[in-house]
Image (cartoon, rainbow, N blue to C red):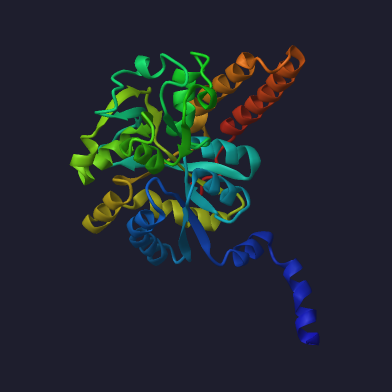
Amino acid sequence: MRRMVLQLPLLALWPRALVAQLRVETLLFGVITTTTVEDARSAWEPFFADMRAATGLSVTGWYAPSYQDAAQALVTNQVQLAWVSAKVALDCIDKANVEVFGQLVDSRGSLGYRALIVTRTDSGVTSINQLLSRPKAYGFALGEDVSTSGQLMPSYALFVPRGIKPQEYFAPLLRGTHAQTVDAVLRGKVHAGTYNTEELDRMKRRDPALSSQLRVLWESALIPKDPLVWRTDLPLSTRSRLSAFLFAYGATSGEKARLRQMFDLAGFKASNNQQLKFVLEIEDFKQRSEVLLDAALNEEQKNERLNDLRDRYARLARALQRPSANGRL
């Protein structure tokens, strides 16, 4: 026992980076689940096996039931790197030592995707103007608060400009993941709901008969592809090994096949926080507009909230301009 007690202070003499590396026995790589946790695990586990073999790192997949769970896991260091939405990435950068280091590349080489509002072909709703024509006339399924395509883009482009508060305008209003919103539409629980082009394309390939039951009422401007983020307190040597593996992955036929199973990907490319500039701008506009249109707030309350939003925008704008700690540099 005395020998053990004498050895413990020696840890204080070791380089901090080495101590940190020893503490990270297993890296958890977060994956957002747009359908089910089981589907995501089945698609990503072969990729993680390749990562462990190539890097020598003990990397385990962690499958987030919701976008909010993914954000919380990154902020609390439950996971050390992750695929997340742009909105989740912004929130994490604001709250923790997190940065963008990569970006998904899909099999078609697309630069982005679009938010959608869909309805069933037999719902009786034939246009977005009809859906938004009268309060309480239609039910709607809205995405999670931290979903870029399920929440942020529809609010920015459709609801805020029309002064619509979804929770007051639609009856009923349901909230959920992409899988849950489209399921509510298909089951006739609501007249319409949010979705996105990536999910709809996958449904068309997987179940053409099911996708044929949907009609697109509206689509957004192009949203940049989702980012990969990591915690900047990961040792530099670990980040270097991770980025070297990720940005080279997809060269062999086996790797290409595994990527296609993972969200129809072709690979990953290097990126940085500036990728999020577009989403920061639309989120800031949405939030400021909601404050200005809120009749329940007096002028003093509005000014206080607007000042808070200005501070947040300035803080995040600075963070997006910071040089990357990317392990490849």
Residue 251 visible, this angle: no
Closer to the camera, 247 or 75? 75
Residue 54 visible, this angle: yes
Q: In this view, does 225 lie to the left or right of 211?
A: right
Q: Quadrant of the N terminus?
A: bottom right
Closer to the camera, 185 or 159? 185
Picture quadrant where residue 213 is located: top left
Image position, residue 172 (x, y; %):
46, 31
Give above or below for 100 relative to 57.
above
Closer to the camera, 219 or 242? 219
Image position, residue 96 (x, y; %):
64, 44
Q: In this view, does 99 lie to the left or right of 133?
A: right
Number of marks drawn: 0
- Report the residue at 35% width, 55% height from top: 39
Give above or below for 107 relative to 118.
below
Closer to the camera, 22 or 159? 159
Give above or below for 26 relative to 322.
below
- Report the residue at 35% width, 38% height from top: 182
Give above or below for 184 relative to 246.
above
- Report the residue at 39% width, 60% height from top: 48
Most distant residue in the left direction: 209
Image position, residue 247 (x, y; %):
38, 48
Picture quadrant where residue 183 is located: top left
